[in-house]
Amino acid sequence: MEPTAVIARVAIVAVPLLVAVVLHEVAHGVVAYRCGDPTAARAGRLTLNPLPHVDPIGTVLVPGLLLVTSLAFGSRPMFFGWAKPVPIDPRWFRRPRLDGLLVALAGPGTNLVLAVASAGALGWLVGRAEPGAGQGVLAALVAQSLVINCVLAVFNLLPVPPLDGGRVLAALLPAGAARSLRRIEGVGLVIVLLVVLNTGILSTLVRPVIALCYELARQVASLVGG
């Protein structure tokens, strides 16, 4: 593969992934701040500058290994990664259960909004393109953004702590059950990764979400194309 093609392929993955994980974490911090918790703001994490959010493993190493593996073997890559979690202190919340629920939903909700926006942008680009010209770099970029944000939203909503879905479930459960659920937080991510990597559950859950976004893109393309 030509060096220019490799750089383009890396950028098509890296740019939307970085945007998705940074905005995911900033959304958690912004909502927490609105709910009375200044921790993320004081730590300088309510910024769109990606550097404070970069996690060496989740933002660089894991996505890089996945991409290099796909380039080396010519396979379809699996895109996955995460940013450094913003610090949240629930003791500041004015309405602990409701505020905790809103903060947990903020990240996946942002990814879903980005997926829908990417679908709209993809439809607009394809609808305006001449026949056969709708698969340019920009269209590939927003198509990748659509997929990445759908995967991140669905993965983070799995109901196991420390994922956002686990925190949503804890906010909805009675206090005793919520405390029991939080006890598995230390090993929860390991359990989730083992299940996801050894089963098709994530692809099964995310496929309908991606299909809905692509259907939206088709509808937008037909409207733009007239």
Image (cartoon, grey):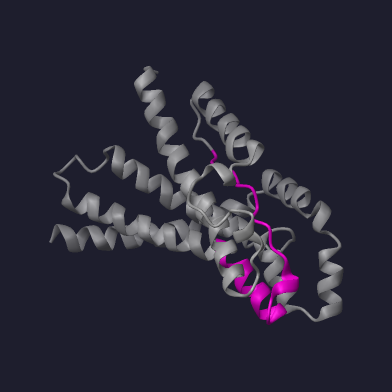
Q: So how many labels did they put on this image? A: 0
Residue at the spot x=71%, y=73% of the render? 92
In the image, is 33 to the left or to the right of 222? right
Q: Position of residue 175 (x, y in %)?
A: 82, 79
At 62% from the left edge and 35% from the top edge, which residue is drawn? 62
In this orientation, which residue lies closer to the viewer: 78 or 166? Answer: 166
Percent x, y for residue 1? Answer: 40, 18
In screen coordinates, is 83 left or right of 18?
Answer: right
Magenta stretch contains residue 85:
yes
Quick one: which residue is furthest to the top in this view? Answer: 2
Report whether residue 124 is seen: yes
| Residue 16 within the segment the image draws in magenta | no
- Quarter of the picture containing the C terminus is bottom left
Q: Please say if 175 is above or below 78.
A: below
Q: 87 and 147: which one is in front?
A: 87
Please name whichever residue, 38 or 107, is drawn nearer the observer in this view of the structure: 38
Residue drawn at point x = 54 percent, y = 57 percent: 46
Q: Where is residue 37 in the image (x, y as percent from the top left)?
A: 65, 69
- 25 lies above or below 135: below
The residue under the point 76% across, 78% down is 173
The extreme front residue here reads 42
Q: Is 190 rendered above or below residue 99?
A: above
Residue 188, given in percent of the width and then of the height, sits at 78, 55
Could you say which is closer to the camera, residue 40 or residue 146?
40
Residue 208 visible at all: no
Q: What stretch is highlighted in magenta?
A: 78-107
Q: In which quarter of the image is residue 184?
A: bottom right
Relative placement, left or right, of 145 versus 32 is: left
